Image (spheres, helix red, strand yellow):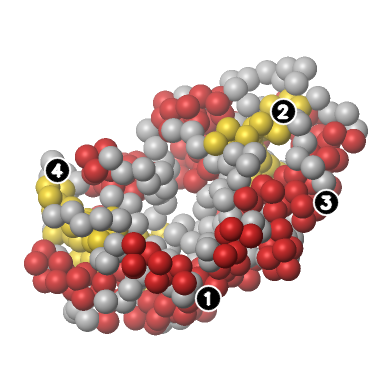
Amino acid sequence: MKVLWFSLSPGLSSAHLNDNYKGCGWIKALEKNIQDKVELSIVFYQDRFIEPFTLGPTKYFPVNRYKHGKFSKAKRRLFNGIEDEDDVKEFVQIVNEVKPDLIHVHGTEGPFGLVQKFVDIPTVVSIQGTITVYRYKYFSTISYLDTLRFSRLKDLLLLRSFVNVYKEFAKKAAREQEIYDHSKHFIGRTAWDRRVTLVMAPAAGYYHNDEILQDSFYKYEWKNKLDAKLILFTTNGPNIYKGIETLLDCTHLLDGINVNYEWQVAGLSRNDEVVKIASKSIGKPVSNNIKFMGKLDEELLSQTLLKAHIYISVSHIENSPNSLCEAQILGLPCIATHAGGTNSLLEDGVEGILIQDGDPYVMAGAIIEMKNNFDKAIVYGENSRKKALKRHDPEKITNDLLEIYKTILNRN
């Protein structure tokens, strides 16, 4: 079977390209497991021109995101632009060159899914996030006005503030609906993305397929005792809708009742713009008990999680956050906001605690509840790990995906 992927990630070629893209770790993991079972080619964006190349059994087709260099970047920034739809012509050329039996588009956020308008080849689209819905939750606690008035003047002048990102989201959402309109087959993982698909593409087929995590998280199991200092851990990103202001608010509640803790935050630094905006929006300084750790590689992230006591997912909207799944498969006790698809990952009161997003009081209360009954928290982690090991079984996920491919080809 000849399969062509479209992805934001360069997959296993990232080291060859010296690519710094840290997201989509599951793409690499899935490629590693499937590349000897199908004839695989991958199309992805790069910020410079690179000829197609082959590594191992996989062929790679980089597409230059900025064909006119700095002019292209400046034009996109000036007009809150998104990827050029002319890129679709290049996608079609690659499809005609590869002649795949099936196309698999990873994500609806980019323009890749538009290739379906111009080629008559069975295509399935994996849902990562859904920009259309994310827009509704973008200014959840931090308002549009606060985001505007607390942004750096430089970012506003250079049109790269979070307000500009929101404007880009509007354009991406319109393009995303067009992709949904032209798609006959979707792959998802949660009740949330399944229900969204029922609305955005009611006639399309929906298939369930989970994600393979990065290798390190299968190798270790969390075993930790509660020390004098409670270690909390969150992986977050530089986005307004990721709930960092709820985390900051929660720390002040914990400080106010003299909880002895350290809250480690991976993915952000103290000087990141989103942290400053969040702090000003809630009118409180950043607690000294927060330790911002910046970006961590796979191994360091897993080792740091093993030393924590509770993982906390604070986002206002997610589909199936890999950061939560990584904590679960290690067996770490977890608290997560009931946002998007998280209730498909973690059963409240059995595998952890689900809380209302944007509520720092219930978040602080859940932390204290786990701290006061840590034996119960450990059981949550054990239950969660059992579920996650089944959910993220690489062999099952790979076989399920191959069956989805075969089913789509047979139906076509």
Residue name at image x 75 percent, y 49 percent: 279
Q: Nearer the viewer, mark 1 or mark 3?
A: 3
Numbered mark located on residue 262 in the image: 2
Res. 29 visible in picture: yes
Tell me, yes or no, whether the two marked residues, 2 and 4, touch with CB atoms within 8 Å: no
Position of 208 with respect to 124 (left or right) is: right
Q: Secondary structure at mark 2?
A: strand
Residue name at image x 14 percent, y 43 percent: 55
The location of residue 352, given as percent across then percent down, is 67, 41
Local crowd size for mark 2, using a 10 Å CA cut-off: few (<14), some (14–19), many (≥20): some
Quarter of the picture holding the C terminus: bottom left
Pointer 3 or 2: first along the chain: 2
The location of residue 178, given as percent across then percent down, is 40, 81
Q: Which residue, given by chain and number where applicable, does mark 1 sit on?
A: 170
Q: Which residue, given by chain and number where applicable, does mark 4 sit on?
A: 55
The location of residue 218, given as percent across then percent down, is 42, 31
Pointer 2 or 4: first along the chain: 4
Measured Cα–Cα span from mark 1 to mark 4:
37 Å
Q: Which residue, given by chain and number where applicable, does mark 3 sit on?
A: 283
Pointer 4 or 3: first along the chain: 4
Q: Nearer the viewer, residue 285 or 104?
A: 285
